Image (cartoon, helix red, strand yellow):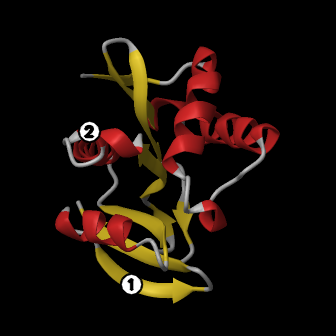
Amino acid sequence: MLIRRVGKEDVESFVDVYTNSYRGLEEYAYTRKRDIKNYFKWLMSRDRDGFMIAEVDGKAVGFVACDTNWISVFERRRVGEIHELFVLPELQGKGIGSALLKKAIEYSKERGRNKAELWAGRTNYKARKFYQSHGFREAGEWGKWIRMVRSL
């Protein structure tokens, strides 16, 4: 498996992997191709170096978008905000998500952040359990979202 920085040329792979990864979880995702492409562009604009892709045999299988420019309204300082992390469903449980999360945390630390923050869907129990297994704890709820944090 290779993890590298995302480039503009990865937009179609992002759309495909995103769409497949959020199947059944559409209430937490963009569902129109145009919106997913705009989301990709927004993630690129936030923190290009923290936006990474996992590839197996040259094929995109997962993405993570870590934004170290994000100012948390809860922490009142810059954090490593993980806007997005997803892996193709058929490859979940094989360490790809863990490797992407590890890269995001390492990147946050390199950028001098000492807290990671993310939001998981309230009924996305699989994601919440995954993040908890990596040291995140639940720190509040906002509508359909659960805020999760971890010290770095």
The residue carrying pointer 1 sits among few (fewer than 14), some (14 to 19) or many (20 or more) residues within 10 Å by Cα, namely few
**Circle 1: residue type:** Ala
Residue at which label 2 appears? 96
Disc on the earlier residue, 1 or 2: 2
Q: Quadrant of residue 47?
A: top right
Q: Residue at x 55, y 19 (%)?
A: 7
Query: Badge 1 is on which residue?
Result: 139
Q: Is residue 15 left or right of residue 56?
A: right
Image x and y of residue 91, in percent:
30, 39
> Viewer-nearest of labels 1 and 2?
2
Q: Report the quarter where the C terminus lies.
A: bottom left
Look at the image and tell me in which quarter the N terminus lies: top left
At mark 1, the secondary structure is strand
Q: What element does badge 2 sit on? A: helix
Q: Amino acid at mark 2?
A: Ile
Left or right, 28 with reference to 104: right
Q: Residue 59 is drawn in which quadrant?
A: top left
Classify 34 as above or below 114.
above
Looking at the picture, does residue 150 appear above or below residue 47?
below
| Total tally of numbered discs in the picture | 2
Q: Residue at x 63, y 61 (%)?
A: 26
Q: 19 or 50: nearer the eye?
A: 19
Q: Using residue 73 as the reference point, say whether residue 87 is left or right of it.
A: left
Q: Residues within 10 Å of mark 2 (few under 14, many from 20)?
A: many
